[in-house]
Amino acid sequence: MVSESHGEPFVVIKTTIPHSLKLRFKVCCVQKDLRMSAVLEKLIRQWIQAELVSLESTSGLSHERVEEVKGYIPKSLKLQFKVLCVEKQVGMGSVLHSLIQDWVRTDDQARQ
């Protein structure tokens, strides 16, 4: 997969999240006619630009089964994301989980 705008290759980014969160994420994307990869790319770009450090804790998760969620983002963005996570001493998976959870929660609140 190659970015149409810059000819840059896309690479996979993935994490595991609770089944119910993955389902809500997929449903929100479908309802908004968005690709999960595009949403993940946007969320990561926003996180990098905001240089957010505080993340909602993902520890103490329920005993719900987890599933893999993955998307394809530009290779340079993944590198930037990885470097920032290392600098902030946070796991990429934890950041992705938190970003997805916040995005879904915001969508849920907008619907109420």
Image (cartoon, grey):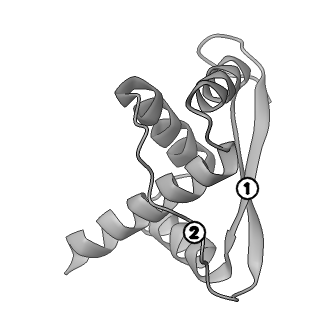
Q: Position of residue 29 (x, y in %)?
A: 49, 62
Q: Earlier in the sequence, mark 1 or mark 2?
A: 1
Q: Position of residue 91 (x, y in %)?
A: 67, 44
Report the side of 25 relative to 15 (left or right). Answer: left
* Residue labelled with disc 2: 26
* Residue at 67% in and 80% down: 19
Could you say which quadrant of the image residue 22 lies in?
A: bottom right
Report the side of 80 relative to 44 (left or right). Answer: right
Nearer mark to the viewer, of 1 and 2: 1
Number of dots carrying numbers: 2
- Relative depth, front residue between 26 and 4: 26
Using a 10 Å C-alpha cutoff, classify the residue at mark 1 as few (fewer than 14 neighbours), some (14 to 19) or many (20 or more).
some
User: Which amino acid does the dot numbered 1 rest on?
Assistant: Thr
* Residue at 36% in and 69% down: 105
Could you say which quadrant of the image residue 28 lies in?
A: bottom left
* Residue labelled with disc 1: 15
* Residue at 41% in and 28% down: 51
Secondary structure beneath label 1: strand
User: Which amino acid does the dot numbered 2 rest on?
Assistant: Lys
Report the side of 66 relative to 47 (left or right). Answer: right
